[in-house]
Image (spheres, rainbow, N blue to C red):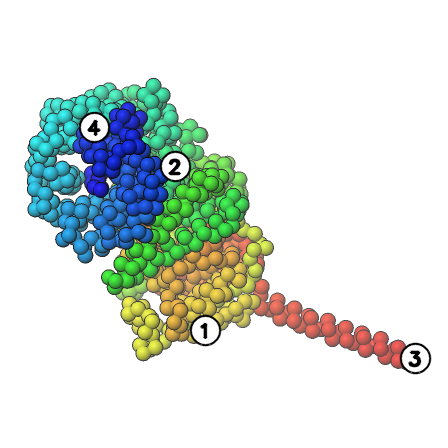
Amino acid sequence: MKIYTITSFLFILLFSPSLVAQEYFNNQLTYAEIDSIQIELYNKGDYNSCAIFTEKVLTKVAKEFGKEDTLYAFYQNDLGSFYYELGAYKKSAFHYFSAQNILKNKIGRHDINYIKALNGLGAAYQMSDRYTEAESIFIELEDIITKQWSTNPNLFAIILNNCARLYWMNKQYKKAEKLLIKTKDIQKQNLGEFDKDYAITLSNLAILYKDLKEYDKAAPLFEKVKKIRLKILGASHPYYAVGLHDLGAFYILAKKYDASEKLLQEALLIQTKVWGIKHYQCARTLLTLGDLYFNQHNWQQSEHYLIQSLLSNTNVASDSFSLDKIHEYDYFSNSLFHLTIQKLLSIYELQYQNGDKQKIEEYYALVQKSIALGEKWKNSFDSDQNKLKSLKSNFLLIEKGIEAALIIDTDAAIKESFRFAEQNKSILLTDAIKGTAARSLGYLPDSLGNIEVMLQKELHQLKNKRLRIRSKEERTHLNRAILDLELQRNKFIEQIKKNYPKYYALKYQDISVSVETIQQQLDDKTLLLEYFVTDTILYLFSISKTKINVYPINIDAKDWMLKLNVNRQALTDFNWIVNHMDKAYENYTSTAHWLYNNILAMALEGNNKINRLIIITDRELGYLPFETLLTAPAPASASYQSLPYLLNQYTISYDYSATLWKQNLATISQAKYNSQILAYAPAYHQPDSANIIHTRSQEYRIRQLLEPLKSAKEEVQKLSELYAGNFIFETDANEHSFKTKASDYGIIHLAMHGVVNAEQPMLSSLVFSENYDSLENNFLYAYEVSKLNLNANLAVLSACETGYGEFQQGEGIISLGRSFMYAGVPSLVVSLWSVNDFSTAHIIRNFYHNLSTGMPKDEALRQAKISYLKQKNGLVAHPAFWSAFIHIGNHQPISIHQESDSMGYIWGGGLFILLLLFVITKQLGKKEKYT
């Protein structure tokens, strides 16, 4: 039979019962008659009747042939396409998934029907914001169809169109344009210009050019689409109305408001007549009308249409709809919801600025509910990439929410603004902790919990392995494995959601920490500082035992970045420091004091009792060691040793979010951790190319450049003389050894080379000794670390840039160090730049000594730095030598078994045994005497 593959991304219709479909269907119909009825309903645009009719057909096929028959899969395919048009993307994905699963097993991956089912599934995932799954599908489709596109060029064009949209959504506009042009040319040659699919491609290309502000290219395409659709569909068809809408939206940009209004109202009339008001396209047209009146400063009319757009985007009855409940509704399109809310907020903001002070309350209430809805959407995704993409769309709302809360300025609003900021911090790491907590509470059977972890772990490993593969054949194999695993995982998660709702709810609930909870954990001398950075304002939240303050700091993005970059160069560029000493001193001291004054001083004023700071950074602030900020202007020339560092006044630690900070405090259980150190000091010899066949050429080249770390070996040797544990050197210090032993120790110390991958942070690695192991390459990648099950209280990464990485909105700095927290380590010492061997050895040695005396971890590191400064003069007292290491996470003290303690136990035990033997001998002697 003919399979109808839907290629448009835009047409959505709310499901409602149809008498037409019921009248058409009876069990006596032949399948040829069924196909004719489907075509008739489809050509009318009555997709609702198509869906109801095909549901009945499926029941008939199941009885006659069973649910594993290919005919059943064909009608599943049809039903997926009809539900796609209706905007029921979950239903659409379900039917496409079922179809492709049957067809893959029955007729293979290269059959055209399987390809159509997979294409439909990818489109449904795409419209549900499941971009990672869609990407895997279209990678697979490109590979399949490229080999056989000449046999079905039209289907090839459809798949290219879908791939182009994926690139478009990921802001890869040039790739999208290239594919759309290729699609257009294929369709023009094979279908001619007066074809529905060709018009869809032209429309997508026109909208792309409009988004790129290339209006001279967009305008003729919009006109051409309108002309084609009018000729082939007629003036009453809803697809023609879509063309009217697109042209009307374009006219707004050209300020042709009268022409725009006429086209939009005509489009809305056609759409509501055919589809009803509850339809995505109607909601989209209503939004555009709201935008039209907004541009004409007609706020009342604009607000009316925007609210109607929200209503049209839901399945809620008109008389039940309320802005107070928008966070409770389901929407056809999340992205359309965000666009509508942002425009509505702009109206309320302008009305407030024009004197309507009550509008700020409406503004704030709308933001609160929209953020709550965005958080719910984010939590519904399984994929990390989907979560981050979802949060990006919520970021602007979070920014507006904080701004509104500060205007309202009540205690509740200020506390809520902090919770908003927390929703933008380390969401993936927080979610990983939530999943562990949910499993530990026993809501999910161990067997299923293990399957979930296995699926996630295997998928994670395959995706990271794909980053390292260059061979096209290997990548194709991996892409297929990833696709199969993603589909398997999605099916498993849906079953978990259905059968274990308590576990699902706990895992996906919002656990952002409250201000009150933080304050319960703080003592009178500790201040938690959290930053939230926008393009124009830096928000600094200051939380003490009894108070919360928020400081909005206006920033000039260009000046702000210049200061941070100059400061970082002054701290990390050793050649600059040595060869331009006067300028390096000026750059460092001026920026260090400027930053103190402009981003920190206001929170410390009046807090005289405070001596400990817990700092949650954001964006580029994550690269800044706050200990190096200067609390007073520096003299024109002075010793680095005597400068007024923040280090001298405060003990400082960092964390990725306040929620994680609280969680790390709560998860410490002394019984869980032993007090011994596992330390590694690898050797770096020139690799033997003859014995390193298994290692990739890139890793081989990196290893050739690595110089021996003499001080690292001495550092670990010194630890072995003072403390109990396992201290491993030379060839024995390899990756396999570490993975085998790591979970058995309370402290992990790695003194080695670190390699940062700026483009793919999860491919940053720690380099162990090369032992020519066929199982491991002795590059421990960040993604491998994150999947380890560690039981350590503390990880000390005495390597270069282990705390440095790429910033990701919503997650923070993606670094090697962060991966250890994923693996379960609540406390880290990491470096922000390439460290100096000599100063590192001094600081690390004193750090461990301070820990052994019972100091908290952050204070132990602070005192180690102060000790270094007291002993050094001249250039070696520069912060570049002592401030690279920072402490992250739980700062509580940790016990360390000292080697001297162990020897004391041995000597004590020996003396006891000798004394016992002496007593026994004496007693035996007495007994012998009196016998």
- Circle 3 residue: 931
Inspect this view and state whether residue 135 appears. no
| Mark toward the start of the polypeptide (3 vs 4) | 4
Q: Amino acid at mark 4?
A: Thr
User: Mark 2 or mark 3, which is nearer to you?
Assistant: 2
- 821, above or below 716, in the image: above
Task: Provide residue 97's location: percent of width, then percent of height.
Answer: 32, 45
| Horizontal relation, residue 33 to residue 682: left or right | left
- 737, above or below 69, in the image: below
Task: Provide residue 303's location: percent of width, then percent of height.
Answer: 25, 23
Residue at 22% in and 49% down: 112
Question: Is label 4 in a helix, a strand or a loop?
Answer: helix
| Mark toward the start of the polypeptide (3 vs 1) | 1
Q: Amino acid at mark 2?
A: Lys
| Mark toward the start of the polypeptide (2 vs 4) | 4
User: Mark 1 or mark 2, which is nearer to you?
Assistant: 2
Measure how far apart labels 2 and 3 are at the Cα level. 89 Å
Measure how far apart labels 2 and 4 are at the Cα level. 26 Å
Task: Provide residue 629's location: percent of width, then percent of height.
Answer: 37, 51
| Mark toward the start of the polypeptide (1 vs 2) | 2
Residue furthest front as drawn: 28
- Circle 1 residue: 732
Among the 4 quarters of the image, the one containing residue 403: top left
Measure how far apart labels 3 and 4 are at the Cα level. 114 Å
| Mark toward the start of the polypeptide (1 vs 4) | 4
**Residue 93, label in figure:** none
Question: Is label 1 in a helix, a strand or a loop?
Answer: helix
- Circle 4 residue: 285
Residue at 15% in and 40% down: 197
Measure how far apart labels 1 and 4 are at the Cα level. 67 Å
Residue at 69% in and 70% down: 909
